Image: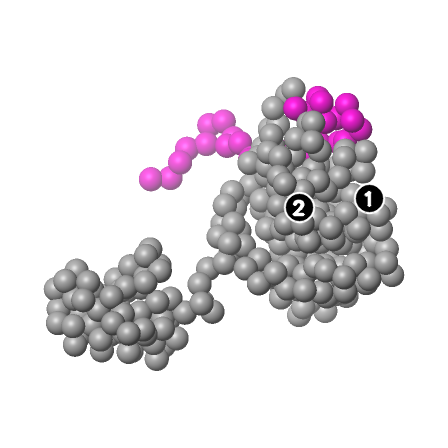
Amino acid sequence: MNSEERKKRILELLKKNKTVTILNLSKILKVTRETIRKDIYELEDQGLLKKTHGGAVLDASIQETDYEKRKSLHFKEKERIAKEAAKHIEEGDTIFLDYGTTTYMLAKELGKFTDITVVTNTIPIINELINYEGINLIILGGNVRKNEDSLFGPLASNNIKELYVDIGFFGCGGVSPSAGITNHHMGETSISKEMLEHCKSKIFLADHSKFGVVALNKTTDYSDVDMLITGEKVDEDMRETIQYKGVEIISSLKPRKKEGTVSAN
């Protein structure tokens, strides 16, 4: 095993265990502790880890956040939801993009527009849209929830009072026929509730894993929801119950292969 292979293995073990020791690495990789120590110094110089007494840890600044991990969950489904949601936006619209990984996917669909205004409380969405000439970006501001890169608190709430949008696109932690729309973080949920009062149309985006789930904080009842876009077929009983409450549910299903299509070898 050469130096580059060892370093790759060290990083793999770090990502799995969050911390490693020189002694254990020496035994696992079957090289001297001095060789491991040299590898760790070089990886630290590259900004890939931080050396500690007798070992190393992942640099906190490069660790994958909970938000980053969730972006990869049900990725294709969220992508389909985002494409469907983008169909409801027209040039000249002012929209709100709530906190969430599916709303982030919607942000990635907005580069084709040449004249829209986007209000958001999510740093990844801000970073995605900040360089688009056709997007007028308004940031709510507020306290930063560091492991999730969201903005909330009194400053954000005060700014919401001065803003009104055409369409609000909201994420959620749970969609339940009995409990309504719920979410996990109290501060983020508070921002969503306040923005709901400042949107002409309210659209919620939810992948299939959110249905039947009840999170800690109530966002809203279905009386304040115009449309719910999901990527999979919703349980028929659940669909009927929610639609009976006046909510339109749109399922952006995975495209089926055409009959007679032969896969390439």
Q: Give the residue number, with chain letter if any, for mark 2.
A: 171
User: Where residue 196 appears, x then y in whole percent?
Assistant: 80, 47
Left/right placement of residue 234 relative to residue 55 reads: right
**Residue 44: percent from the left, percent from the top?**
34, 76
> Left or right of 182: which side holds 28?
left
Q: Quadrant of residue 149?
A: bottom right
User: Which residue lies at the image location 31% right of the left edge and 69% below the top edge?
Assistant: 56
The span from disc 1 to disc 2 (Cα, nearest Å) is: 14 Å
The residue lying at 61 percent from left, 60 percent from top is: 145
Which quarter of the image is occupied by the C terminus? top left
Label 1 CA crowd tier, 10 Å (few <14, some 14–19, many 20+): some
What amino acid type is highlighted by mark number 2?
A: Gly
Is label 1 in a helix, a strand or a loop?
Answer: strand
Identity, as a three-letter code, of the amino acid under mark 1:
Ser
| In this picture, residue 70 sits left or right of residue 202 | left
Q: Magenta stretch containing residue 37, yes or no?
A: no
